[in-house]
Image (cartoon, grey):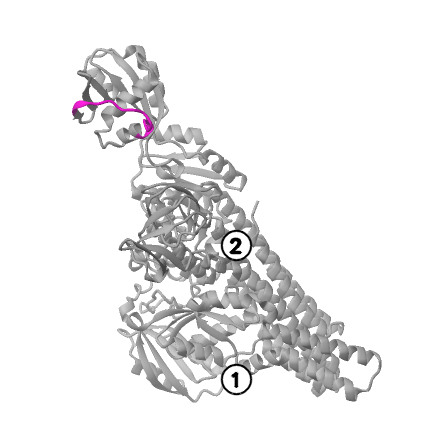
Amino acid sequence: MANKTQFIGETKHSCNDSCCSESSAALTQPEIPSCSCCSPEDSPTDADRNHTGHLDEEADAIEEHCDCCSHPAAPATAKSDISVNNFTITGLDCGDCAIKLEKGLRKQEGILDVKVNFATAKMKVTHNHTIIQAAEIAKIVSSFGYKASLINAINQQSQFHKSVFTVSGLDCGDCANKLEKHLSTLTGVHSANVNFAAAKLTVEHATTDSAIIQAVSQVGYKAEMNTQSIQHAKIQEEWWNNPKTQATIGSGIILAISMILDWLAIGDIFIVPLYVLAAIIGGYSTAKSGFYSMRSLTFDMNFLMTVAVIGAFAIGEWGEGATVAFLFSFGNTLQTYTMDKTRQSIRALMELAPAEALVVRNGLEQKLPVEEIVIGDHIIVKPGERIAMDGIVKNGTSAVNQATITGESLPVEKTIGDGVYAGTVNEHGALEIEVTKIATDSTLAKIMHLVEEAQSQKAPSQQFVDLFAKYYTPAVLAIAAGIMVVPWLLFNQPFSPWFYKGLVLLVISCPCALVISTPVSIVSAIGNSSRNGVLIKGGAYLEQMGTIRAIAFDKTGTLTHGHPRVTDIISINSSQEDVLTTAASIEKWSEHPLAVAIVEKSAGLTLRSVTNFKALVGLGAQADINSQTIFIGNPRLFEDLGLDLSPYQKQITDLQQQGKTLMLLGTQDNLHGMIAVADTLRENSKDALVQLREAGIKHIAMLTGDNRQVAGSIAKELNIDTLYSELLPQDKVATINELLTNYQNVAMVGDGVNDAPAMAASTIGVAMGVAGSDTALETADIALMSDDLGKLAYVIKLSNKTLSIIKQNISFSIIVKVIFVILTFTGIANLWLAVFADTGSSILVTLNGMRLMRKIN
């Protein structure tokens, strides 16, 4: 397997001295820890985990290797062999002791992951119970000088389930990271993922949902089940009614009054209480969250700001303390508003499908909630209404606006037998629709689910951000603490100025703008693509699409329509209409694809009565019309009949060289005409490939199982760089591997079903026309809901734009932090300016990321 599957099949690790032992720890999916010979920092990344979903069925065949010896590690652990044990640890004296215990246990054979929570004195161990038992783990802990008491044992396969919550009260991206870490250490929690940009919390756990909600509330936030998110979203739209917003306004008014009185030199006895009141009103929610943060030992921005305000008051800087509280509250209010705008793209999807539909049961029409409507029910959709359920038109004709699903700009004509999707708009004409999917299984519901999952995944660029934040914040905190006390203790410097500088460093130690710089961009871009009929499964795929330099297309159904169409009608001893009418009259009795194409072309013509129809296997067919036997078939049929085709040989050869299948019509003595049939190009295929080259694609290949003559004519018309014909599915995989060798990053575009192996072997698998196809939606990394190939160039441009904005955000965030660290030491930066820079930069990167919500030209 190449490229894509290298994330799980060819992962390289840096090794320590214990690397080359034959008893390397078994590795496993779904939670991929480091191997026994590697440090935790070298473990597979989130991006790697994202890729493991491609070929779950091949996971057992995949091995990991070490750089130093290239020996394969133990084969992947079966899910049934994985257990998670929770222990209470006695004797832990410091956080560093907890870290050392983690590292020591990770080196033991059979232990897959260890998390020690020093604050709660709890330890969670994921292990292969066929190699090491819980009692053995407790014994190993005792060898480190601690005591481990087993709380409970959870079998991963049977007990864990996933819950999704909407979280309110998160003020910054770093707060989200700290909440995630806090939840991950709780008993019964296997994994927790907090997506600040989407305000979503996903927890895989073996406890109750109410326990998770309570755990979230204990650190100062509010969580509710995701089923309440629509109502919650509508409440949040009235931002001016938000208590935090009102508190910010009140704090600002009192602060302004205080400053005016201060300027007028009114006595401190009046001014100081007003400053304190402004700080209390503006900083109450911040202090409350800071308290919860301190209690759980997750020192987030709220805690640091609270310390800064109290510290400023302690050294008599009343005005600056109140200003810090107000500016931080004001910044959070603005950031909440801008982030809410970003999240609106998904909320808009949620509100597309009506909550009720007009159902016909027992001859009576009644309004029912969509949850009560079952497969097989018939619903009535009037002009101008949104369709509530996926289904098939049983009566009526209309034009349906499918832009919400496929991104098509023009309405699509629908008649009896055509499929329709929930959330689309019936433009004119009433439709009676037979429901084919329940509400929770509709195409729109699947899109919403996949988009939310995509937005929760961390992109590769986020790994750099997390790594930077991991070291930056503790480093600055340590420097701040040193500045506060070292000059005073060791160099006899005045306390207040250095303590003040330490407070400034505290304010700028939290990398909020940096942490949010990537997710807000990813959320905006994925929301943009979903509104334009393109489903991107995650930030990793969005970023990778911008690195693609070669694209391989399947031919049939991708570049072409996927079924034969009549391209030429040549009359010889008759009119074109007569040739088509006669041919269709015979072919309507055949089920051959070529016959179907001819009958479709004759729509609207009056066909003739035929008798004695007979299929001629491998040649064509014959039937009697008006007592005369008429033949239709390939040139060989007429050669066998003894007809001289030499006068028509040039026309026959020219059409065949164009990759068309030729059917001749006539009697045993005379040729009446010829009909050419071919799988024709999609109307926009040629333009789409031109746009791809303009977007930076260097090489375009076509992969097909068709013969070279037919495929060659299409490749020539489209100016394809390389044609690979007469390929079996395994040949397509080999071809993708060859392209990967030459171009490193390759996308494979197909139908998402037949091309699944080749798509899995490529860097990015793109399926097109997947609306209504559950299999294709699940298979592809990127899914085009319609058959518009022009969306590919749009996705590449969107990816490039996203990468550019992410780089801008990260660079800007780091530069601001570095500048303010320098300004602090020079004495130029003060508290309120530091708060302004911190919250201001967060808002600026958010607004910059939101630019991706606009249409990409």
Q: Quadrant location of residue 578?
A: top left
The image shows residue 824 at horizontal and vertical percentages of 72, 73
Kind of residue at disc 2: Ala
Q: Residues within 10 Å of mark 2 (few under 14, many from 20)?
A: many
The image shows residue 460 at horizontal and vertical percentages of 49, 59
**Vertical arrangement, residue 685 with respect to residue 220, above or below:** above
Q: Residues within 10 Å of mark 1 (few under 14, many from 20)?
A: few
**Residue 481 in view in this figure:** no
**Vertical arrangement, residue 412 with respect to residue 248, above or below:** above
The image shows residue 554 at horizontal and vertical percentages of 37, 40
Query: Which residue is label 2 attached to?
Result: 525
Q: Is residue 608 magenta?
A: yes
Label located before the other in sequence (1 or 2): 1
Q: Please indicate whether residue 223 sits to the left or right of residue 822 in the image.
A: left
Chief secondary structure of the magenta portion: loop
Quadrant of the image containing the C terminus: top right
The magenta span reads 600-613
Kind of element beneath mark 1: helix
Of residues 620 and 250, the one drawn nearer to the viewer in this rendering: 250
Query: Which residue is label 1 attached to?
Result: 295
Q: CA distance from mark 1 to mark 2?
A: 37 Å
Q: Residue at x 73, y 86 (%)?
A: 273
Mark on residue 325?
none
Q: Is residue 342 magenta?
A: no
The image shows residue 482 at horizontal and vertical percentages of 65, 81
Kind of residue at disc 1: Arg
Of residues 422 and 460, the one drawn nearer to the viewer in this rendering: 422
